[in-house]
Image: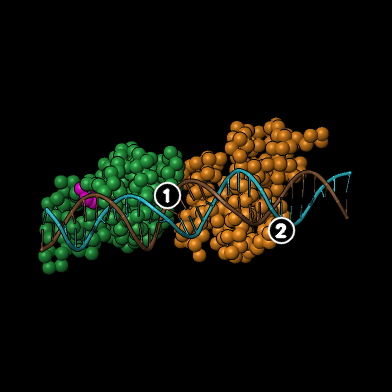
Chain colours: A green, B orange, C cyan, D brown
Amino acid sequence: MEISFTEENYLKAIFSLSRLYGDAEVSTNQISEHLNNKAASVTDMLKRLAEKKFIDYKPYKGVRLTEKGRKTAVKVVRKHRLWEVFLVEKLKFKWDEVHDIAEQLEHINSDELIEKLDLFLGRPKHDPHGDPIPDANGKFYAQKSIALAEAKVKQVLVVTGVSDHSTQFLQYLSQSGIGLGDHLKVDEVNSYDHSLKVKVNKNHGLFLSHKVALNILVEVKS
Amino acid sequence: MEISFTEENYLKAIFSLSRLYGDAEVSTNQISEHLNNKAASVTDMLKRLAEKKFIDYKPYKGVRLTEKGRKTAVKVVRKHRLWEVFLVEKLKFKWDEVHDIAEQLEHINSDELIEKLDLFLGRPKHDPHGDPIPDANGKFYAQKSIALAEAKVKQVLVVTGVSDHSTQFLQYLSQSGIGLGDHLKVDEVNSYDHSLKVKVNKNHGLFLSHKVALNILVEVKS
DNA sequence: ATATTTTTTTAGACTAGCCTAAATTTAACC
DNA sequence: GGTTAAATTTAGGCTAGTCTAAAAAAATAT
C-alpha cells in the first residue's frame, strides 16, 4: 500500500499519455520525455511498477495501466484538480499560477482530507482550466470545458467557469445575465472581429466580444 | 536553496528540542529519540546540515541552530500551524485529527501560498492546539499560556491549548467537555495530590488530576 | 533481406537516508 | 585516578531513484 511521490508521478504520466494517444500502450521514451528524465531511469521504474501490479509491462512493448494503476493515477488527478480549485477560488491565485503548487499538494495522502476538501469546495466538476474532476470512485462525469470562443455555431453549451477571475469581468458577466450552469448557444460569429451573438438561457441577441468569449469556459452538451 | 523534507524535519526537531530544554545544545540521542530513528543516522544528517550551514556542530558536543537554520525551522512551524487552522476552521476536522495531515502539508514549498493562506485564514495568532503562530519574519508575538496547574483559585481562564498532543489526551478532554476557547475557573485545589475542582463554562464540579492540569494551557483573563 | 537507425534495456555508478556493529569519546562512579 | 557505563561517531551495507555508456531488440530503408 505504500506508494512514493515518484511512483505516483509515473502513474500520472502514463495515465495522461495513454489518454492523449487514444488509450494505446505508452512507450518508454514518451514517459521519459514527459517526466524530463532518461529512458534508462524509466525502464527501472517500470519494472518496479510492474512488480507492484500498477502496470502491465512487456519489455520493448510499452506499458498499460492495470485497474489498480488507473485508480491510483485518477486519484492523484482528482487531488491535483481539487487543490487547483481551492487555490483559485479560495486563495485567489490566478489560474495560471497554480499548477506547480498543485503538483506538490496532489501527493498529500489522506482520504478524509480529499473528501472534506471536495465538500468544502462544493464538489466542483471542473478545475480552473476546465478539466473535469473525477469523483471519489474514479469516474469522470464531465467533459473537458473549452473557451466559448472555440465553440461552434448552434452547439448547446453550459457555462462551467471563467478564466479571468477579476471582479470587473465577473461583474460584467452577471450584468449580462451569464452565470455558472447557464445554457448558451452561439447564433452568429462575426468573421471580422470574431465577436459573437449568443442566446443565454431563453434570451437571444446578446453580443459578446472575442476577448470576453475567450474567458468564458463552457461544456459542449451536443 | 534546495532543502529536503527530511532535512526540514531534522531542523524542526532540533528547534523544538532546543526550546524544550531552555535553548541549550541538543544532543544526538535526543534527536534520534524524537525522530524515531538511530543515533548513527542522526550523526550522518548533522554533518550534512552543518555542511549547509543550518547548524553549528562540534562532534560529541551537541548541536545548535544557526540563524539560517532557525529561520528555516520556524517557517516549517508556521506552515504546520497555519495548515492546522485551515483543517479545523475550514474543513471541520477535529483538533485531534489534524496533526498527521499538517505534518505532510508543512513541507509544501511556496512563499506565496503561505502568505495567501495566512490571509485567507485571517492571520490567526494561535493554532487549534493553542500554540502561537510565528509571523512571516519568524517572530512569535503571541503570549505564552500557562498550565492550568499553575493558575490560582478564582482566576478567570480561557483554554488556549494543550501541551500533550496525544490522541488519548485530546479525546479525554473532549469527553470532559473541555475545548479551545472554553472558560475555566479553579474552585478548589486539593493540597494533597494537587487535583482540581473546576468550573467549565457554566458547569461547576469537574474533577481534574494534577497530571491533566499540567497539560492544559490557559490564558489568565483576570 | 540485409544494413542502418531508433528505441529500449542492461550494467555499473552515484546520492540521500536509513540501518547494524564496532570503535571511540565523554561522563560517572568508587 | 582508573574503571565502567553511556553517548556518539565511524565503517560498511542497504534501497530508491537517478545517471552514462554500452548492448540488444525493433523499426526503417535500401
Bounds of the magenta segment: A18-22
Of marks 1 and 2, the one in the foreground:
2
- Depth order, front residue of B103/B53: B53
Check the residue under mark 1 and report the chain it is in: A
Q: Which residue is mark 2?
A: B61
- Depth order, front residue of A3/A49: A49
Residue A129 position within the rendered picture, expressed as x and y whole percent measured from the top left: 30, 55
- Depth order, front residue of B133/A6: A6
Q: Which residue is mark 1?
A: A5
Query: Spatial distance from mark 1 to mark 2, Cα to Cα?
Result: 36 Å
Residue B218: image tag: none
Which residue is painted at 28% across and 55% down in the image? A29
Secondary structure, magenta segment, majority class: helix
Query: Quick one: SS at disc 2?
Result: loop
Q: Residue furthest bottom?
A: A192
- Depth order, front residue of B195/B54: B54
Which residue is painted at 61% across and 62% down in the image? B50
Q: Residues within 10 Å of mark 1 (few under 14, many from 20)?
A: few
